[in-house]
Image (cartoon, rainbow, N blue to C red):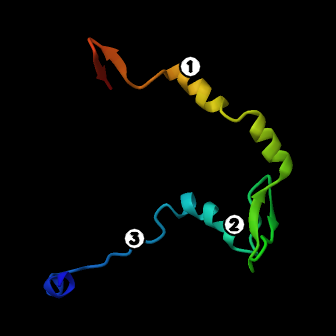
Amino acid sequence: MIVSASYSLPSHTLWLGSVLANETDPYFQQYNETAPCPAECHRVLPAGQRVTTCVPRPEWTEEWKKTEGEWEKELMRTKGHPAKSVGGHDEL
């Protein structure tokens, strides 16, 4: 019903090229088996899969787990809670 009712409406598709490709391409590079993995990662073939994928090296994972939550703690220490109670009301 919606498709048939909107069929006569004008529609124009505009291709903007590779907008923000430099921002997004590195995240999808891991799915290209011929591309190198990001730093601190290596390729593995997950069980039951036909394509390799990038995963963090165990050393990186161990180091990350040591500091897990530190960023959040620092953010709360320096910025505090985003809402401050004033007169019984929260202000953002």
Which of the two marks, 2 or 1, is nearer to us in this view? 1
Earlier sequence position, callout 3 versus callout 2: 3
- For the residue carrying disc 2, how many other residues have a C-alpha within 10 Å: few (<14), some (14-19), or many (20+)? many
Q: Position of residue 9 (x, y in %)?
A: 15, 82
- Which circle marks residue 30 in the picture? 2
Q: Amino acid at mark 3?
A: Leu
Residue at image coords 80%, 39%: 63
Q: Amino acid at mark 2?
A: Gln
Question: CA gap, disc 1 to disc 3?
Answer: 42 Å
Question: CA gap, disc 3 to disc 2?
Answer: 25 Å
Residue at the spot of label 3: 16
Residue at image coords 61%, 26%: 73
Element class at badge 3:
loop
- Which circle marks residue 77 in the picture? 1
Q: Position of residue 48 (x, y in %)?
A: 76, 77
Q: Amino acid at mark 1?
A: Arg
Element class at badge 1:
helix
